[in-house]
Image (cartoon, helix red, strand yellow):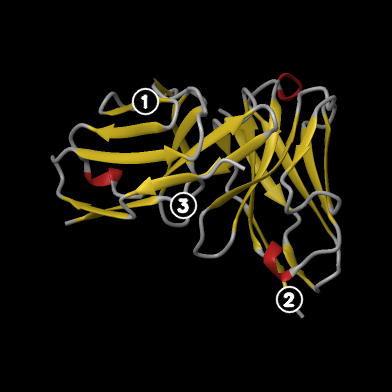
Amino acid sequence: EIVLTQSPATLSLSPGERATLSCRASQSVSSYLAWYQQKPGQAPRLLIYDASNRATGIPARFSGSGSGTDFTLTISSLEPEDFAVYYCQQRSNWPLSITFGQGTRLEIK
Amino acid sequence: EVQLVESGGGLVQPGGSLRLSCAASGFTFSSYSMNWVRQAPGKGLEWVSYISSSSSTIYYADSVKGRFTISRDNAKNSLYLQMNSLRAEDTAVYYCARGPVLGEADYWGQGTLVTVSS
């Protein structure tokens, strides 16, 4: 099973600052990497798919990059509503494996 | 507007069974694959099961294989998860999620809580 490791576990920043979240896979997942945002008491929301494509309705301040084993989610200038938990997720076809990282909590400094 | 509404959660004893449902609206249900994803209290996300649009392809996480069965009724725009031999570690909020492609979930329901306890 492919393991995703997210870092840092918690990131403390202020509104307006730039956030950089990391996701590392235990083996290559090509570009099959997605990012989700989850706020307390809410369902997750898809932000980025295939490593770098923004999902429908996602603001341009969110961007994704990387391929293979190292991926990054960048939020260029934090808005108050961006403070949440972020998960990366991979899928590999053979053998089938769909796993999530443990999450990064983005909190207000 | 895409809507996914889960139901069927509740309290069940270890070894018991439960059937979850997910009612879909706002899109052509029969054209999309679907997923179940769960989240234990205070924990991260765990993918549970996937079913293709025509039900021809089905996958399960190893943790539920042989105990859970995913199905769908395209005429009723509904997704199901039959859960048998439930264990305490199955306690979680269960989300149904639309999957445009395998391994991707672009819309999620609000979830239904399953508690396995004596």
Q: Say which element carries label 3.
A: loop
Tell me the number on the disc at residue A102: 3
Distance between mark 2 and mark 3 Cα atoms: 25 Å
When the figure is inspected, residue A73 is found, relative to residue A6, above or below; the finding is: above
When the figure is inspected, residue B88 is found, relative to residue B78, above or below; the finding is: below
Point out the image quarter for the N terminus of chain B. Answer: top right
Q: Residue at x 23, y 46 (%)?
A: A80
Near mark 3 (Cα within 10 A), the count class, few <14, some 14-19 or many ≥20, is many
Q: Say which element carries label 2.
A: loop
Numbered disc 3: what chain?
A
Q: Residue at x 85, y 69 (%)?
A: B15
Q: Amino acid at mark 3?
A: Gln
Tell me the number on the disc at residue A66: 1
Numbered disc 2: what chain?
B
Numbered disc 1: what chain?
A
Q: Position of residue A83 (x, y in %)?
A: 29, 49
For label 2, the residue is B117
Tell me the number on the disc at residue B54: none
Q: Amino acid at mark 2?
A: Ser
| Same-chain check, marks 2 and 3 | no
Closer to us: B108 or B55: B55
Q: Foreground mark, 2 or 3?
A: 3
Residue A68: which quarter of the image? top left
| Same-chain check, marks 2 and 1 | no
Point out the image quarter for the C terminus of chain B. Answer: bottom right
Closer to us: B36 or B75: B36
Residue B77: which quarter of the image? top right
Left or right, A80 with reference to A69: left
Earlier in the chain: of badge 3 and badge 1, it is: 1
Closer to us: B4 or B69: B69
